[in-house]
Image (tube, grey):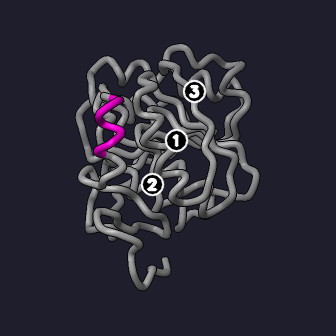
């Protein structure tokens, strides 16, 4: 991806063509005085960059595509989808305290991301039918989430979703989920790495529904 010659100010970094804020950025510090994200929604997680790199190589994204991010947190991959391909993106998270951080970063990149506070279990077939592609990064970190995501992927298939992608550094609940998905669906579990903003290795589960 082309890089800016000069970043606009301190505590901003660039990865895969978008700008993102570090925790010590002055605007992030201001937001943290009023919002306290929980459920690990307190920073940008590295698996987001794995999926950005994968999207660039696979060319799965296209203009006006309806995309849903699960457990979006600060939303870097949602922002990438909107910025890079002009997708219509909705970010969901059970913790609505993360949305001001996502909105701040979206504004920095001059894109708009819809937000919705909802848990994974509450995403019904009718809800999921509004999307062509669903993804999540670093969202399978508790044991019970493997079963929750397995059921969600099954609902997504019934709803007519074409692709579900999950990226993870390699936690056991993620592997437990992948094992069940590979048996039931047309899916791949891929070793992947990214080089922006630094080198990072992990895994991508790509479910083709």
| Residues marked 2 and 1 touching at CB (< 8 Å) | yes
Residue occupied by mark 3: 116
Instruction: Say whether residue 54 is left or right of residue 178.
Output: right
How many numbered circles are shown?
Answer: 3
Badge number at residue 58: none
Q: In this view, which residue lies farthest toward the bottom?
A: 5
In this view, the residue in front, 159 or 121, is 121
Badge number at residue 51: 2
Q: Is residue 34 magenta?
A: yes
Residue occupied by mark 1: 135
Q: For the residues marked 3 and 1, what is the alpha-carbon distance in whole angstroms? A: 15 Å
Within-10-Å neighbours for mark 2: few <14, some 14–19, many 20+: many
Q: Is residue 83 above or below residue 207?
A: below
Expressed as whole percent of the image width and height from the top left, the position of residue 122 reads: 55, 14
Q: Is residue 37 magenta?
A: no
Q: For the residues marked 2 and 1, what is the alpha-carbon distance in whole angstroms? A: 9 Å
In this view, the residue in front, 41 or 62, is 41
Q: Which residue sits at x=39%, y=19%? A: 147
Q: Is residue 185 above or below residue 14?
A: above
Tell me where the magenta segment starts and ends, as one range. Answer: 29-35
Instruction: Say whether residue 187 is left or right of residue 155.
Output: left
Where is the C terminus found, in terms of image quarters? top right
Local secondary structure at mark 3:
strand
Q: Is residue 157 above or below residue 30?
A: above
Local secondary structure at mark 1:
strand
Mark toward the viewer: 3 or 2: 3
Q: Earlier in the sequence, mark 2 or mark 1?
A: 2
Q: Earlier in the sequence, mark 3 or mark 1?
A: 3
């Amino acid at each position: 991806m082309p890089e800016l010659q000069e970043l606009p100010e301190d505590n901003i970094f660039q990865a895969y063509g978008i700008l993102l804020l570090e925790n010590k950025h002055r605007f992030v510090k201001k937001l943290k005085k009023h919002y306290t994200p929980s459920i690990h929604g307190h920073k940008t997680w590295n698996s987001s960059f794995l999926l950005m790199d994968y999207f660039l190589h696979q060319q799965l994204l296209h203009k006006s595509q309806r995309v849903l991010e699960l457990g979006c947190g600060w939303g870097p991959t949602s922002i990438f989808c909107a910025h890079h391909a002009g997708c219509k993106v909705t970010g969901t998270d059970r913790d609505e305290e993360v949305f001001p951080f996502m909105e701040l970063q979206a504004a920095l990149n001059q894109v708009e991301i819809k937000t919705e506070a909802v848990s994974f279990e509450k995403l019904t077939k009718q809800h999921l039918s509004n999307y062509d592609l669903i993804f999540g990064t670093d969202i399978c970190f508790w044991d019970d989430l493997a079963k929750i995501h397995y059921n969600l992927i099954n609902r997504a298939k019934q709803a007519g979703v074409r692709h579900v992608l999950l990226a993870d550094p390699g936690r056991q609940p993620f592997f437990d989920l992948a094992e069940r998905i590979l048996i039931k669906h047309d899916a791949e579990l891929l070793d992947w790495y990214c080089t922006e903003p630094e080198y990072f290795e992990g895994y991508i589960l790509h479910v083709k529904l």
